[in-house]
């Protein structure tokens, strides 16, 4: 099976995440796109603003209704820090794994735990927004990754949380079911 893995804190998941997932599916001929919310991100010095169970539920709601999108809770269930190298070991060895990253994450991949194993186990796929310096990304990852062409969407989870705290609308930045969940659970307010 050809599987695209899209990991992240998803705090909250937003439309740019979904555009990226759809681009991976369409451009790579993937069988399934697997969203993997991080349990305890190793790279964050403080906990995520939302508890893992909230982030997991928001991703489930964001992915609902798309038959080739699935949500994997392995990192949320894992005790301790979440590392992609451990997550990749949970997949069937015969699966073709495509690890989908933004250019910023790809630039920092050498800081990941056992990053060489990550790039051996999964084919790196990097979202190339307009203005991405492809040569710098290739230098950072040590080889030429596959590239996804995506439109520039200036949406970030941090921006969405900031808008929520200031009482501004986040409609059209997150899927409607995620917006409802944020309101129901009074997240980010």
Image (cartoon, helix red, strand yellow):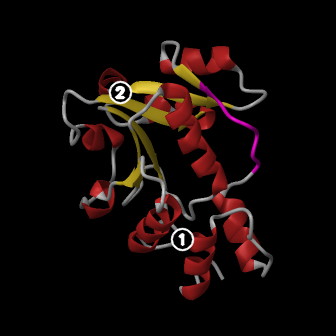
Q: Which residues are magenta?
A: 148-154
Q: Which residue is mark 2?
A: 122
**Vertical comparison of 95 with 69: above or below:** above
Q: Residue at x 31, y 21 (%)?
A: 120
**Quarter occupied by residue 107:** top right
Q: Which residue is mark 1?
A: 49
Q: Quadrant of the C terminus?
A: bottom right
Which SS type dominates the magenta stretch?
loop
In three-dimensional space, the C-alpha distance between marks 2 and 1, rounded to whole angstroms, equals 29 Å
**Residue 52 place in picture, x, y as percent:** 40, 68
* Left or right, residue 150 beside residue 36: right
Q: Earlier in the sequence, mark 2 or mark 1?
A: 1
**Vertical comparison of 179 with 108: above or below:** below
**Vertical comparison of 180 with 143: above or below:** below
Can you tell which mark lies on residue 30? none
Please name whichever residue, 102 or 93, is drawn nearer the observer in this view of the structure: 93
């Amino acid at each position: 099976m050809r599987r695209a893995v899209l990991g992240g804190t998803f705090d909250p998941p937003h439309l740019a995440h979904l555009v990226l997932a759809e681009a991976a599916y369409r451009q790579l001929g993937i069988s399934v796109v697997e969203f993997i919310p991080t349990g305890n991100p190793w790279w964050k010095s403080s906990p995520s603003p939302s508890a893992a169970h909230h982030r997991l539920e928001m991703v489930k709601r964001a992915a609902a209704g798309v038959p080739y999108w699935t949500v994997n809770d392995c990192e949320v269930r894992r005790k301790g820090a979440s590392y992609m190298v451990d997550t990749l070991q949970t997949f069937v060895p015969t699966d073709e794994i495509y690890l989908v990253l933004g250019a910023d994450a790809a630039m920092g991949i050498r800081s990941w735990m056992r990053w060489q194993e990550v790039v051996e186990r999964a084919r790196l796929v990097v979202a190339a927004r307009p203005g991405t310096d492809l040569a710098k990304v290739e230098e950072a990852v040590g080889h030429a990754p596959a590239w996804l062409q995506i439109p520039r969407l200036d949406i970030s989870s941090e921006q969405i949380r900031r808008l929520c705290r200031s009482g501004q609308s986040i409609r059209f930045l997150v899927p409607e079911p995620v917006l409802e969940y944020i309101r129901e659970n009074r997240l980010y307010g």
